[in-house]
Image: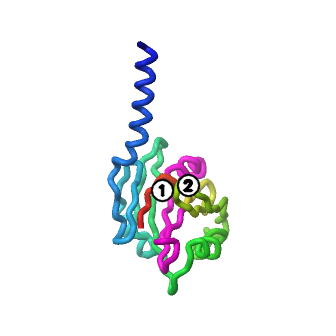
Amino acid sequence: MKKVFINTFYCSLLVFGLFSFQNIPRIRVNEDLSLVVPLPNVELEELFSAITKVNPTVIFLRSLSTSKSKPILFAVSRYENSKPVKLSSAFYELTANHNPTNLVDLSKEHKVISFREYKKGNKTLYTKVSKPFEEHCVVMYYFMKDNFSKVMYEIKLSGKLSEKKEMESIAEKIALSVKL
């Protein structure tokens, strides 16, 4: 009897875990992009307003609550090119191994930790991890509608370098939920 209860309990946990992500509401970022944020999150209106004045490519900003005490910043940026390009070309030629030039003195410390293209299920994902300055980490994923467009989207999680693994896991879940 005890064994049946334990097996039923674990099966219930597994089923709940598999379907709980599906019950989280989809967020429409703009007319083209929607996604699911698998954590409690808060809009940061004042910070968003300040950031968009300096960086108008940012179109969405939230603070994600995690198991750690410090929240993780989550942003979506939209980049537009004058002509359509393949996502793989844009990723490798324009983002993968490039350091930002708009960070003034901070760009001296900026380092690309890793970048890669990989398959997960039926999706090809493009990701980059960087360290913009000491003890800080940024995990990014890139998207285009049909992998060929003038518009490229970037999702980005920013937090402490010590939380890199957790941010990579969260970012991948969000990336897999992206719909264009």
The quarter of the image holding the N terminus is top left
Mark 1–mark 2 distance (CA, rounded to whole Å): 8 Å
Asked if residue 104 can be seen in this view, the reply is no
Residue 120 or residue 42, whichever sits in front: 120
The magenta-colored residue range is 141-170
* 150 falls in the magenta region: yes
Using the image, tell me which numbered label, if any, was put on residue 120. 2
**25 relative to 64 in the view: left or right:** left
Please, what secondary structure does the residue beneath circle 2 have?
A: strand
Q: Position of residue 119 (x, y in %)?
A: 58, 57
The amino acid type found where label 2 is placed reads Lys
In the displayed structure, 31 sits above or below 35; it is below
Q: Residue at x 40, y 59 (%)?
A: 35
In the displayed structure, 105 sits above or below 10; it is below
Residue 116 or residue 55, whichever sits in front: 116
Residue contact between numbered discs 1 and 2, judged by CB atoms under 8 Å: yes
Q: Residue at x 34, y 59 (%)?
A: 27
Q: Residue at x 56, y 72 (%)?
A: 87
The amino acid type found where label 1 is placed reads Leu
Using the image, tell me which numbered label, if any, was put on residue 176. 1
Q: Residue at x 45, y 50 (%)?
A: 71
Label 2 environment density (alpha carbons within 10 Å; few <14, some 14–19, many ≥20): few
> Would you identify the image quadrant in which residue 78 lies?
bottom left
Q: Position of residue 59 (x, y in %)?
A: 40, 70
Q: Position of residue 33 (x, y in %)?
A: 39, 67
* 161 falls in the magenta region: yes
